[in-house]
Each structure stands twice: as structure tokens, then as C-alpha cells.
Image (spheres, rainbow, N blue to C red):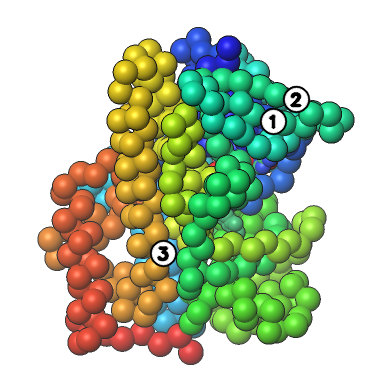
Amino acid sequence: MNDAIIIGGGPGGSTVAALLAARGRRVIVLERERFPRFHIGESLLPYNWPIFAELGVLPALEAAGFPRKTGAQFHLGNGRKSLKLVFREGRFTEEPQTFQVERSVFDHLLLKNAASKGAGVREGWRFQRFEQLADRVRVEAADPAGAPHKFEARFLIDASGRGNVTGNQEGLRVIHPNLKKLSLFGHFTGVVRDDGAPGGDTVIVRLADKWFWFIPISATKISVGCVLDAAEFAAAKTPPEELFHRLVATSPVLRARMQDARLVGEFQTTGDFSYYNRRLTGPRLLRVGDAAGFMDPIFSAGVYLAMFSGRLAAETVEACLRQPFGTSWRLARYERKTFSALRFYWEMVEQFYTKPFMELFLEPRELWSIPAAVNAALAGELTGRWAIRWRMRIFFLLVKLQARRPLVPRIRFD
Ligand SMILES: Cc1cc2nc3c(=O)[nH]c(=O)nc-3n(C[C@H](O)[C@H](O)[C@H](O)COP(=O)(O)OP(=O)(O)OC[C@H]3O[C@@H](n4cnc5c(N)ncnc54)[C@H](O)[C@@H]3O)c2cc1C
């Protein structure tokens, strides 16, 4: 019998697959697409680095020549204020750098790594439904020709991303009422980028109720996208690319970066509603990455969370296979830790859309090393270190105070 069936060969699925296969477990990955395939989500976090090391993919990532990201920049669209965060300058930040990646290449590299460790990767196979049996799960899937097949395994890992296949089957998805967003994006050449190390930064440009990302994914190509309310997009009744350029034209910061930009390939649109599933586990099921929950990508945490939860899922399944006694307790612990990681970024995202948060965020003061805690949190420090947690609580408290009485100067978006 298989030890685990993994739905989806994105970063979450291939992390679980590689770690379990490396321990000699029988693992099947069902991936509906054929890799390499396009995927959005190109800016990684520094705390991805130790996971890359554990997976043994650092040499391959270095050889792929991806740009290095050593910081992140946040600018107001009117150019009046900005913050340049350098990870190595954060007192609590233990990982100073990461990569910016073209996901088609990155995801393929991770999936091939899982296969090289012994995972049975089946591309072009579509998961359809699962059934919980007493001591195993049964999965129905269609092969590339559409023919039905059944598989059984001790555990099922749902890493289907925003496909959210098992959460949908069980009706568990909760959509955030205020974060119903949509993204307009493309890859461009000719975009202005900073000189030296900051040229590898993710650049975020914040307008009143929307924001743009700039992510350098190769020496010449930059991913540029805009996240706005889905309702605003619907009301605009304007073709996506035209709306994108109209929004660029409203900001001097955006205009300066985009003046000579040329689109490479297709201009794209995707919905990005934030959601989570009410449960992240079943008796023999673990949901990882976007199949656990997805949030607005402002802090570039999606791939990291997928690999963070993927690693945790692999450790949990491995422990349960070795010692079945205590399975439900281990699954509950997995759920608790994954929810806590999701909740942290969820709260940051909700705050990002408020003005008081931006006011304090863009004007860091050396009070109790709070900026250092924010630096670590945005690099992906999720180990729950008390030194960071209490500072983040104070930071959020200060945001509440700022809403009532200005502790730092107010900002304007116009
Ligand atoms: C506009 C936008 C911008 C983003 N920007 C960033 C960013 O800068 N940085 C960042 O870290 N994250 C970003 N994200 C989030 C990031 O894309 C995801 O969090 C990340 O890809 C999650 O990885 P995953 O492995 O959980 O899922 P995915 O990478 O989505 O992989 C899931 C896989 O499952 C497969 N699958 C789905 N259904 C089935 C099925 N029925 N059968 C078999 N296979 C199936 C899919 O084909 C896919 O390959 C962004 C997201 C959006 C929408």
C-alpha cells in the first residue's frame, strides 16, 4: 500500500513528496498539469532558504541564475514616503536572502527533485474525489486520457493550491468578506530597476485602495502586477490591460518605473480572494499551502507557507507511520501550527489595507526594536519566538492607537 498520495506538484506538494520519499516512503504525486507550466507567485521569503537546504535543491537553484532578493521596498504611489527593508539589518532575522523566481522553472525543479528521491510523479493526472476508510484513504483520479483509476494510501495530502479540492468536496472554505481581490499582471522588459543589491528587491507601490508589485525574475524580466478590489474591476468595464495602464498613469512612482516597459508574453488576470478552510486535517488527511488557506499576496508569503506547511506535514505523516498511536494528536498539532502561521499573515494583510498601519509601517521608530521584529516577521520567522511575538503585539496595539491619535504623521495617498 502507498504511504501517501499527494494532490498537486506545486511547491507544497513537492516539498512533502521529496521529504517523505527521501525517508523511503511510498509516495504518489497526482498533478493535473504537465510541467513546466506557468504559475504566478514569484517572490520568495528568506526563511525559504533552510527548507531549500533540507530538500537539497540549493545548488540547482543557484545554477538556475535566479535574482537574489535581500530586501523589500514599500513606496506610496505619490512618492511622498517609502521604506526600504534590508533583511540582514534585522536584529532577529536569521536568514538574509532568498531568490526571486520564474515559477515555471522553480516548480519544475522542485518536482524533479521529488521524483529523483523516489516519489512517483504522475503529470496530467486529475484528482476527482476521496473517501475516508477506517485505516486508509481511497482516491479517485483520471489519467491523461480521462480514464478513471483508484488509489489507496495511509495518508492523503491535499496540496492542490487554490484548486482547494478536498476543502471544496467537504464544503469547508470560508472566504474573507473584505479581501475579494483580483490581480492584473504580466512580465515586462525595460522596467526601471535599482542599481546593485536593491535591484533584486520586491518593490511594492501602494495606492489608496490597491497596490502594485515589481518582482525581478531574471536579468531582464520583471513581473509587474496590480491587486485591486474585484468589484472595482467589474465596475470599470474596461479591458484588463487597458485598466492596468490607466492605473499606472495615476502614480508618478509607477510611471517612472514603467515608462519604457514592454510586455513579454500574455497579459493575465486572476481572482485572488483570500480564504481558509475551517479544518486543515481529517482522520488521515492534511491540507498544505493554498489548499489550507490563501491570502492576498502583499507580503509574498504564499510559497513559503506552502513549503513550511509541506515540511510540517511530512514530519507529521512520517511520525504517524512510524508510531500510529497518537495520530489524532499529531494531526491536531499540525492543524494548530499551520493555522497559527496563516493567522499571522492574515492579520498582517488585513492591517496593510488600513491607513494607520501604513503610517507606522512607513515611519519605523527605534522603540523596543519593534522594526527588527517586523523585519523578521516579513522574512518568514514563524517559529513563534517570544522576542518577536510580544513586539508584534505592541506594534498592532500602536496601529490601533494611531487610528485614534497620530503617533507619527498622517499620510495621504493623493
Ligand atoms: C496574483 C498572485 C500573486 C502572488 N504572488 C506571490 C508572491 O510574490 N510570492 C509568494 O510566495 N506567493 C505569491 N502568491 C501565492 C502563491 O502563488 C501560492 O501561495 C503558492 O503557489 C502556493 O503553493 P501550493 O503548492 O500550495 O499551490 P500551487 O503552487 O498552486 O500548486 C498546486 C498544484 O496543484 C495542481 N492541482 C490543482 N487541482 C488539481 C487536481 N484536481 N488534480 C491534480 N492536481 C491539481 C495544480 O495544477 C498545481 O500545480 C501569489 C498568488 C497570486 C494569486
**Between marks 1 and 3 in the image, the one whose residue lies nearer the viewer:** 1
Q: Which mark is residue 140?
A: 1
Mark 3: secondary structure: helix
Mark 2 and mark 3: Cα distance apart in space: 41 Å
Q: Residue at x 42, y 74 (%)?
A: 353
- The image quadrant of residue 32 is top right
Query: In the image, residue 101 lies at what x, y percent?
Result: 59, 44
- From the viewer's perspective, is 338 left or right of 111? left
Q: How many marks?
A: 3
Asked if residue 125 can be seen in this view, the reply is yes
Q: Residue at x 64, y 29 (%)?
A: 139
- From the viewer's perspective, is 100 left or right of 394? right
Q: Which residue is mark 3?
A: 349
Mark 1: secondary structure: strand
Q: Bin the neighbour count of mark 2 within 10 Å (Cα to Cα): few under 14, some 14-19, many 20 and up.
A: few
Task: Give the residue type that dot 2 points to.
Answer: His
Task: Give the residue type that dot 3 points to.
Answer: Val
Taking the view exactly as shown, the residue that stands out farthest to the top is 24
Mark 1 and mark 3: Cα distance apart in space: 36 Å
Q: Who is closer to the viewer here, 277 or 255?
A: 277
